[in-house]
Amino acid sequence: MPTNFFQETEQVAMAPANLIPGIEPSEDRLLQGRVFSYSDTQMYRLGANHQQLPINRPLVNVVNYNQDGVLNVGTTQSNVNYQPSREGVVEDQAARHSTPSLAGDVQQRAIYKQQNFAQAGELYRSFTEQEQRNLIRNLSGDLGAVENNEVKHKMLSFFYKADTEYGTQLTKAVNGDLVKVKKLAMSL
């Protein structure tokens, strides 16, 4: 158990973009997407100064151009809050950028997924019968309230594609058209 549960679980902000100068992420597209999205998520969740929180703060002082903002818990010794500047921090340009040589296809190819629904089906089948009934009841409450039949049946086809029993039971629970659901599932 963490010493300070809130600080060490709710305030921690891990992101693959937190790298020291000179170390860069690979060209992996999934990682490249996460480099942006994780940092953006932490900024939204914890505020612009989340890296000043004790759990996220580096062990050495950071000298950068960031100043003030929401939840500012640090002190700034400079009036320079823009870049580039004649005053303030001098950056080591040697570690700023790299130009790795790449070979082969590194972009412009869709991530191909053969089994988009397999994991959802495995999860459903791992449940006990009571858990499956509870899931169907909970989903049917919300899905049954969907007024657009096209949207409703499209969603039902996803459940059917994951597991035929799953889709069939849910379709019956929301009074959907099973023939239409099967037809839509075949096109996925």
Image (tube, rainbow, N blue to C red):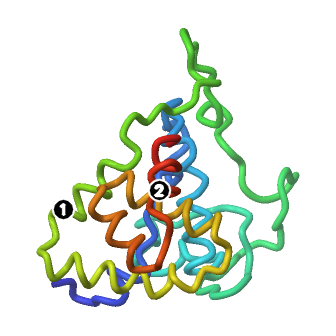
Question: What x and y, as percent, mark residue 183?
Answer: 50, 48
Which is nearer the eye, 109 or 168?
A: 168
Q: Is residue 85 left or right of residue 62?
A: right
- Give the mark nearer the N terminus: 2 vs 1: 1
Estimate how packed mark 1 is, as few (under 14), some (14 to 19) or many (20 or more) residues with alpha carbons within 10 Å. some
Which is nearer the eye, 135 or 16?
A: 135
Q: Are marks 2 and 1 in contact (CB under 8 Å)?
A: no
Q: State which quarter of the image contains the N terminus.
A: bottom left
Question: What x and y, as percent, mark residue 188?
Answer: 50, 42
Q: Residue at x 29, y 56 (%)?
A: 163
Instruction: Give the residue number, with chain letter if any, for mark 2.
Output: 179
Q: Residue at x 48, y 57 (%)?
A: 181
Q: Is residue 46 above or below residue 60?
A: below
Which is nearer the eye, 35 or 163?
A: 163
Q: Is residue 97 above or below residue 87?
A: above
Q: Residue at x 56, y 79 (%)?
A: 45
The residues bearing labels 2 and 1 have C-alpha atoms spaced at a distance of 23 Å
Which residue is farthest left?
128
Task: Count the numbered circles shown.
Answer: 2
Q: Is residue 86 left or right of residue 130?
A: right
Question: What x and y, as percent, mark residue 126?
Answer: 15, 64
Q: Amino acid at mark 1?
A: Arg
Instruction: Give the residue number, with chain letter if any, for mark 1.
Output: 125
Q: Amino acid at mark 2?
A: Val
Mark 1 lies on a secondary structure that is: helix
Q: Which mark is residue 71?
A: none
Mark 2 lies on a secondary structure that is: helix
Estimate how packed mark 2 is, as few (under 14), some (14 to 19) or many (20 or more) residues with alpha carbons within 10 Å. few
Question: What x and y, as percent, mark residue 102?
Answer: 56, 14
Which residue is farthest top?
103
